[in-house]
Image (cartoon, rainbow, N blue to C red):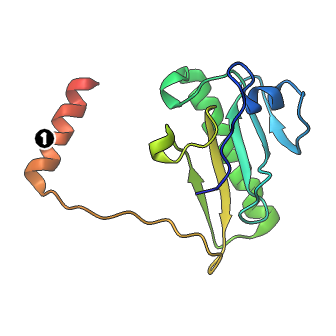
Amino acid sequence: MPMFIDTSPPGQCIFCRLVAGEIPSARVAEDDLALAFMDLGQVNPGHVLVASKRHAATLFDLTPEEAGAVMRMAQRVALAARTAFDPDGLMLLQANGAVAGQTVGHFHIHVVPRHDGDGIDYTWPRKEPGPAALEAYAQRLRAAL
């Protein structure tokens, strides 16, 4: 994960300021609900952030319309990155909360073109709880839906 941590004071979110045009950015695309702009910390050429225009700290704070708009924009950017940079693959990364790796408290998705040997290491410990536990997890989720 990136080493950048947003230290903006409350009420001065760095992405809100970027959306408002108070901070310069290399904008890629935007619509009424979402903005795509180049990440200052390019992992690979074409690394773009897609953020909600309205301040929402996490996925849990978005409206369904905003969530859909951000994902549609992420897909548009991904398709453009495929054409412009010819990556071997592409990664979407979205984190909610510091423990998940979120470093800016404004909802955004990283669109990262990937190339073989690019140095990005993204792994987690695989756990196999078994069919009974999986069904119990699914039941909990169905109940919450």
Q: Is residue 113 above or below residue 92?
A: below
Compared across the picture, whether 68 is left or right of 81 comes to left
Q: Name the residue carrying label 1.
A: 136
Q: Residue at x 80, y 33 (%)?
A: 30
Tell me the kind of residue under disc 1: Ala
- Where is the N terminus found, in terms of image quarters? bottom right
The quarter holding residue 36 reads: top right
Q: Residue at x 71, y 45 (%)?
A: 49
| Relative image position of residue 122 (x, y in whole percent) | 50, 65
Q: Nearer the viewer, residue 8 or 131?
A: 8
Compared across the picture, whether 85 is left or right of 87 comes to right
The mark tally for this picture is 1
| Relative image position of residue 130 (x, y in whole percent) | 12, 58
Q: Is residue 38 above or below residue 128?
A: above
The quarter holding residue 11 reads: top right
Element type at mark 1: helix
Kindly give the residue lying farthest to the left in the view shown.
Answer: 132
Q: Residue at x 49, y 37 (%)?
A: 97
Q: Is residue 104 above or below residue 90?
A: above
Is residue 34 visible in this depiction of the protein? Answer: no
Q: Residue at x 76, y 22 (%)?
A: 32
| Relative image position of residue 69 (x, y in whole percent) | 64, 30
